Amino acid sequence: MDAEQIRKQLRSRQTQDRIQAVKRAAGAEPGQRQALLLEALADKSPYVAALAAEALAESADDSAALAMTERFGFLSEDGPGRDPGCHIRANLAFALGRLDYRPASDVLRIGIRTTQVEPVGGVPFDTAAHLRANCALALAQIRDPDCVRDIALLLFDRSGFARLAPDPTVKMEPRKAAARALSLSGSLSARLPLTLRLVHPENEAPEVLQECMQALVELEDPHALEVLEPYLRHHDMRLAAYAALTIAQTQAPEAAALLGEAIQRLSGDPLKAVILALTTLRTPEATELLYALTRSEREAVRLAVIDALPPNAASRALLEKLAAKDPSPRVRAAAKSALAAGE
């Protein structure tokens, strides 16, 4: 189908025809693709326009990015009327970030502050959560010089929730995206809001705190251990385990000892995850601790260690000892199975 045929299909009264036209436009020749998608971006159907915005992320040049930015601003003037559900602007934000189009910073800054309350199932609901999230990530991607301030405000924003029976964990995606965006920014100043959120985590969802931990480590904060270490004693074992995993990523000299302390408090999958994290440290201290855990009083620890032992002569000797002398039938069986698998 040539460009004129696609353009004709874009003008069909049938929404399904126009959806197919956008898909064909996305696969058209480079010289035609952009113009066709920009035409589709102005479609009366928000769904068709959102598809066009998504496709433009793959091929738009600066002239198209300017048109996309202007469209974003136009839609923002009357969000509920022109972009119900915020899907077009959310896709435009993603595209502008991927295209590294820096002149879009002003409209992205509008998007990151947007709250759009619409009825969903008869309940007033903020539909702009994914828009704020994508704008945060886009601002970081284009390396906007002032992005840390705007993204930090989003990290602490709790405005996005259902108006009935508000739950502090609902609409956490913008805050998770804010943490990721702070890491993407690469700015040293981004360490501060992440630290504040982790040191003062009141009522914050564990998923958001995990993103903050990861971001702080990726930003190579020299004080990361001071912030993460208290979480090893958190009542939420999964959050404690995640803190241990991020501590392991720092490769700090103290990491092995800290993980060893956490192991004494954990059980189940969090315990297994932290013991496996020990193997990523690849230090004499970590190896010594791993071998020492084969003598733990806790059966669960000994079982987890069997799966984490590196394939070498020292590990085989420990497995043979466990298989022959461990007081637990489960541990003996697991050790025998590990020996057989290594033959």
Image: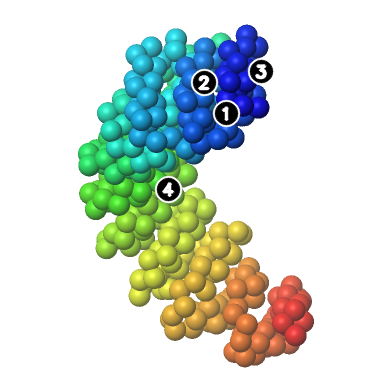
Q: Residues within 10 Å of mark 1 (few under 14, many from 20)?
A: many
Going from N to C along the chain, the mark reached first, 2 or 1, is 1
- Distance between the Cα atoms at labels 2 and 1? 9 Å
Amino acid type indicated by mark 4: Glu
- Circles 2, 4 touching at the beta carbon (< 8 Å): no
- Distance between the Cα atoms at labels 1 and 3? 14 Å
Q: Residues within 10 Å of mark 3 (few under 14, many from 20)?
A: few
Q: Which residue is mark 1?
A: 25
The image quadrant where one finds the C terminus is bottom right
Q: Which residue is mark 4?
A: 211
Q: Which residue is mark 2?
A: 40
Amino acid type indicated by mark 3: Gln
Query: Residue at 66% of width from left, 18% of height from top?
Result: 16
Going from N to C along the chain, the mark reached first, 2 or 3, is 3
- Distance between the Cα atoms at labels 2 and 4? 36 Å
**Circle 3 SS class:** helix
